[in-house]
Image (cartoon, grey):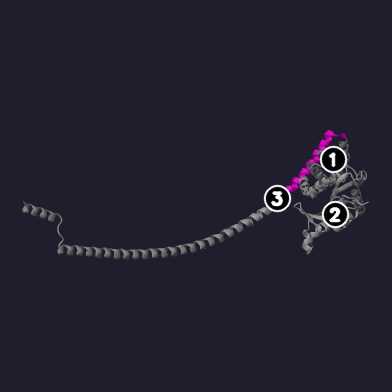
């Protein structure tokens, strides 16, 4: 039998657990949902307005920053420009002071160099004479014969006088040796072509060129009419002989040397002597060998009309084109004159432009001639 009371109790319990939604409850839930949606919408628009205000503020800050950046750059450029002007002025001032000091330093260095050159040569002469006194009786006799006469002060050795004169006005041994290095390639090329190391230097002086040739593997011999110069060469273990240059050349066999040089020699002999020198040189030099002259450059008007006459033993002016012609006429090929610069460079004479008086004043002070004996001789 069904217990109706028991069933009613269970239905009531289920009803309490799962309440049935009434129309009133449904309306209440809908109202709450609308309120929640409206509230969220309001909050969203408030956030949107706040975001818009923030973006506007950021744009204002960015504009202010760009303005500040532009102003700062302008200020920096202006400051940089002012600073550069001050630096340039300071640099110009420093350069002026430096230039003045450099000129004074150069002047002092030149004076020191001149004094050193004079001292070196005087020391060399004194040292040589001392060695002569200690080691060689024949040289003692030479010094006695050429020593100044105490009772007659006007009597001096011309050899000593000219060595001292040349040392003072031509330069120190180091300076002359450095200058002569420009001719080494020609000498070495001649030795290679002729397969001969013999080289003759006329008027060898203190032996600067002989020393250069020997240091580079050649076998040079020097000839000089100044006894003291020959002694100076021998003191440096260089091969030098005392005597007349033309007598020496006359004694040499044909085709017996790779080259002949004469530095500041031809201005000391007359025209016939120059011709004889060229002809004898052509006879002695082997085919492929070289002839080298150096002489004052009379194209420089100060040299030609003033400095040339400082040396009391100078005789002959000679024009570069005349010298080239004479050497070519004597049988040599590629006879070419060069101006010798103070920087040890050879400038072809024919490439030098004489357009203004200033060109004649500033022309290099020395003239060189380099010529070659042809490898094949037409008989």
- Where disc 2 sits, the SS reads strand
Quick one: label 2 or label 1, which is nearer the N terminus?
1
Label disc, if present, on residue 335 of the rendered structure? 2
Magenta range: 110-137
The x, y position of residue 63, in whole percent, is 42, 65
Say if the magenta span includes residue 371.
no
Q: Is residue 364 above or below residue 192?
A: below
Q: Let me know if residue 14 appears in the view.
A: yes
- Where disc 3 sits, the SS reads helix
Residue depth check, mark 1 versus mark 3: number of the one nearer the observer? 1
Quick one: label 2 or label 3, which is nearer the N terminus?
3
Residue depth check, mark 2 versus mark 3: number of the one nearer the observer? 2
Q: Nearer the viewer, residue 379 or 138?
A: 379
The x, y position of residue 336, in whole percent, is 83, 55
Residue 329 position by quadrant: bottom right
Would you call the spot at circle 3 few (<14 residues within 10 Å), some (14-19), or many (20 or more)? Answer: few
Q: Nearer the viewer, residue 46 or 100?
A: 46
Name the residue beneath numbered marker 3.
Answer: 108
Name the residue beneath numbered marker 1.
Answer: 239
The x, y position of residue 75, in whole percent, is 49, 63
Q: Let me know if residue 317 appears in the view.
A: no
Residue 349 position by quadrant: bottom right
- Where disc 1 sits, the SS reads loop
Mark 1 to mark 3 CA distance (whole Å): 37 Å
Quick one: label 1 or label 3, which is nearer the N terminus?
3
């Amino acid at each position: 039998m069904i217990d109706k009371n028991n069933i009613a109790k269970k239905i009531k319990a289920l009803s309490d657990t799962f309440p049935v939604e009434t129309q009133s409850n449904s309306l209440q839930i809908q109202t709450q949902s609308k309120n929640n949606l409206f509230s969220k919408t309001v909050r969203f628009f408030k956030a949107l307005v706040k975001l818009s205000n923030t973006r506007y503020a950021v744009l204002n800050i960015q504009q202010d920053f760009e303005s500040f950046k532009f102003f700062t750059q302008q200020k920096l450029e202006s400051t940089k420009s002012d600073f550069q002007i001050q630096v340039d002025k300071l640099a110009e001032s420093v350069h002026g002071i430096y230039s003045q000091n450099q000129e004074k330093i150069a002047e002092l260095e030149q004076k020191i160099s001149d004094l050193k050159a004079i001292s070196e040569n005087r020391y060399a002469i004194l040292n040589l004479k001392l060695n002569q006194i200690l080691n060689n009786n024949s040289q003692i006799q030479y010094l006695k014969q050429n020593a100044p006469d105490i009772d007659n002060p006007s009597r001096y050795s011309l050899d000593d006088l000219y060595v001292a004169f040349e040392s003072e006005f031509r330069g120190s041994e180091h300076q002359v040796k450095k200058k002569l290095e420009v001719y080494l390639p020609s000498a070495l090329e001649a030795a290679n072509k002729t397969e001969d190391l013999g080289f003759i230097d006329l008027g060898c002086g203190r032996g600067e060129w002989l020393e250069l040739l020997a240091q580079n593997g050649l076998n040079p011999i020097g000839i000089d009419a100044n006894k003291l110069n020959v002694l100076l060469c021998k003191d440096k273990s260089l091969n030098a002989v005392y005597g007349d240059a033309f007598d020496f050349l006359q004694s040499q066999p044909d085709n017996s040397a790779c080259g002949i040089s004469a530095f500041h020699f031809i201005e000391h002999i007359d025209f016939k002597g120059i011709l004889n020198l060229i002809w004898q040189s052509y006879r002695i030099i082997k085919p492929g060998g070289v002839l080298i002259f150096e002489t004052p450059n009379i194209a420089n008007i100060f040299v030609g009309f003033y400095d040339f006459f400082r040396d009391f033993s100078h005789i002959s002016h000679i024009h570069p084109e005349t010298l080239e012609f004479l050497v070519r006429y004597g049988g040599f090929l590629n006879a070419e004159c060069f101006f010798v610069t103070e920087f040890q460079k050879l400038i072809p004479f024919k490439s030098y432009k004489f357009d203004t008086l200033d060109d004649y004043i500033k022309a290099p002070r020395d003239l060189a001639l380099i010529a070659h004996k042809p490898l094949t001789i037409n008989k």
